[in-house]
Every structure is written in C-alpha cells, then in structure tokens.
Amino acid sequence: MIKIKKITIIFIVIFIVYCFFRFIIHDFVFGHDIAYKLSDDKFNFEIREILNLKKDLDKTNYYFNIKVKKRNFTFKIYADFNKDMKIIKEIKYYKDSDFECLLPIFKDNKDPIDMMCYYKNDLYFNYNLPKRNVSLDKFVSDLKGDYDDVKWFNNKRDSFKYKGLTVYSKNILANHYMAVDNYKGITLVNNRDRAVNVKLFFNDVYKSKLKYIIDDNYVIADYNKQYDFNQFYVVNIVSGNVDKVVFNYDISFDAYVNGTNNGLLYLVDRENKLQYAFDVFKKDINIVGDVKRGTIIYDNGQKKIMSMSENNIQEYKFKLSSKNNKEYVKIDYVLGYCYFYERDNNIFRVYKSPIENIKKKIYLFDTDNLETINYVNDYIYFRKGNDILYFHDSVGVKTLVTDREYEFNKDLKYYVYRGAK
C-alpha cells in the first residue's frame, strides 16, 4: 500500500514536471497555435491565434484568422503581449449591404491594428476605405472608448519649412532617421533634431547617381570634382558626422552603383572598365572586377560573375527577393508578409498578406514609383508625387516630408535607417 502511494506521488510529480516543461518549451520556444471562440449578442467568432516566436527575421508576431459566418478576416500583428494566449478579449462587428467590418479589441486596451472592412469583396483598413455611408460612420462613432479612428488618419496640420522641405512634425518617428537629397548635400530628418542640413558640395549638383546607404551610413562620391573622383563622403545619418575617405584610384563619373552586400558597396566604372568594392566600415576600396575577371553581382543573395561588357550595357543592379507574375508587377517577401504591387494605369496599388495565408490580401496604399519603396523593419516608406510617406499597421499611412523638387529631378532620393530603441 505504501509503495502504491509512493508510485502515485512520483507519477504526479513527474506529470507536473512534464506539464511545466511542456509549457515552457511550447510557449517560449515554439510559440502556440490555439483556437477559441468569442460572441456578442448576434454573432459567434471563431479565432485561430498563432504565436510565432522569432521566426520572421528574429521578430515575434501573432497571426490571426477570425471567422464570422462565411467570412474570414486574416491579419498579423507585431505588438508585444508577453507571449500571452487568447489576447483578443472582444470583437466589434458591423455588416450592411455595402460593408462588413471587424474590430478586434485586445488585452490591455492596445490597438495594434485598425478596423478592417470588406467592400466589394476586397479587404481594406477603415482609414483607407474608398467609400463610406452614414450607418458605418454611426457605428464608428459609437465605438468611442474602444476605438479612436482619428489615430489612423493622416495628420498634415502640424508642419514646418526647412531648406525647401515641408516636414510634418507629428509624423516623425522616434528612432527613425531619414536623409533627403538636396543639391549641395543632404537634409537629416529625425525626432531628435527635427531637421539638419549637411553641406557637402560647393556648387549645386543636379545629377548625382553615385550614392547609396549602408546601415546608417550615407555614401556619396565627391561631386566637387569634375570628371573623376578619388574620395567618398560618408555621412552617419544618426549622428550627422561626416568622414572623407580618400583612395588611390581615379574613378570616372561615368559609373554606376550595383548595390551592397555584407557592408560592401559595389560600383562599376564604365570608362575604365573596372568594378570597385568600397568597405564603408573599414573605409577602404579595392578593385574586384575588370574585363578579364568579369564583375561580381548578387542575385537574391547568390554571388555570380557577369562579363564587364554585359554589366556595362545593362547597368546591372543587385536583385533582392522579389517576384512578379501576370497579375502583379512585383511581389516582395518581407518580415512575415507578402507585398503585392498591382498596376492601375500610372499608379501601383499595394497589398499585403501574411505568409501563412497569402490569398488573404489587404489593401494598403497607392504609389506612383516602385523604385522609392523602402522596407524598414515592419515599416514601409514610399513616395507618392512630392510626398515621402510611410505605412505601419499600428498607425496607418502618414506623410513625413514634402519636397517639390521631385517634380523636376528624378535623381533626388531619400534614405531611412531605424536605430535601436
């Protein structure tokens, strides 16, 4: 009898230890995948919640699919809920002949994502719905306390002028550092200094192709020279410090940048038929390609060798992970999402979907220039007309800077770096 009791106690202890370690391993190593239900007076909501622990470029996230009747609302958030389970505590739901909308209410009253609405079977956020009606507006108005729709709309009221730019001060993000080209250097825009000019050139430079950003370093050729250059300016866009890196080569301005890989900036001098790699951290430059050896290119991270003549003709740029098909001109896979770019006459409509279910897309914004897309962690920066804007799930679309020179000069660029919190 005593042995049976001891065996029972041992079994219970082992079971408790097993449950404890299963919980630790499951929730703190693998995350969780659970289903639960919520309901209101009229509707039942089936929720699938997946906690992905550092699977998307080392960033923890929650994936959700919420089913109400035959409709599915699918989305992902990166807000911190301390790896908790069942983080949606309530759901607000609206339906009429035009719209079907859902607002998840999260624990701790966090609002990491805007209300989502189906309109003509396409999914939108509330802030960018193409149409509204009185009934929907009343539903939103009645949500006061649970939902602040003003937060999601683009605030362009608070602004200041600086060096030809209009900067929207309320939309400057902490720890985000922007550099905007001007004709004598760059303007730095950030939450700390608001706006600072960095002068690099004596005279206005209208064509400046030899420039790039590597992490928080803006690199540009010395356009104070006329035909050839032997110096890079390296501007740290966080501190504003400027380094002058002189080297023992005379590089023709008849050159172009291939791209970067592992901290190296690659460029091809077409006149002299040489390829250089500039190490921005060691402040060193070396010849890595010529007519005999060919040139180094990186295609989706894979190193390849291309002939010098072929590289010269195409002005070959390093390619990132991007695809296209008949329906979309561009598809990018970034940080747990697929981004889809659909041409609509002279603009591109941008959608995204979680990689867990790429068929469930939500419309984000329009842009008129695919070359200006910058993915900065889980933010997307882009240009539309004269405006530089950004999108994030937690704030919607916000305008950061307006530069009217974009109307006249396509060589003007902008660059963004996100610092540590």
Image (tube, helix red, strand yellow):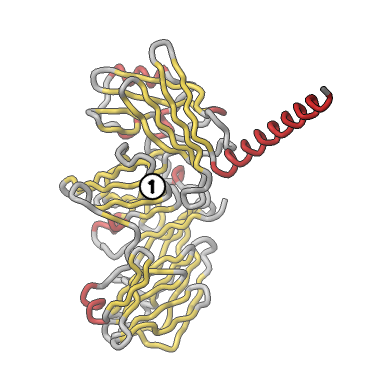
Up the image or down, 15 lies above or below 410; here it is above
Residue under numbered circle 1: 390
Q: Position of residue 65 (x, y in %)?
A: 40, 31
Task: Determine whether, in the image, residue 355 is placed left or right of residue 236.
Answer: left
User: Does residue 156 appear in this view?
Assistant: no
Foreground pick, 409 / 378: 378
Q: Position of residue 183 (x, y in %)?
A: 34, 67
Q: Kindly give the residue lying farthest to the top in the view shown.
A: 41
Quarter of the figure with the N terminus: top right
Task: Say which amino acid is labelled 1.
Answer: Tyr
Q: Residue visible at 51% across and 23% down?
A: 89
Foreground pick, 387 / 280: 280
Up the image or down, 13 lies above or below 254; here it is above
Q: Kindly give the residue lying farthest to the right in the view shown.
A: 2
User: Does residue 196 appear in this view?
Assistant: yes
Task: Determine whether, in the image, residue 119 is placed left or right of residue 251.
Answer: left
Dot 1, crowdedness within 10 Å: few (<14), some or many (≥20)? many
Q: Position of residue 12 (x, y in %)?
A: 72, 28
Up the image or down, 288 lies above or below 347; here it is below
Foreground pick, 235 / 159: 235
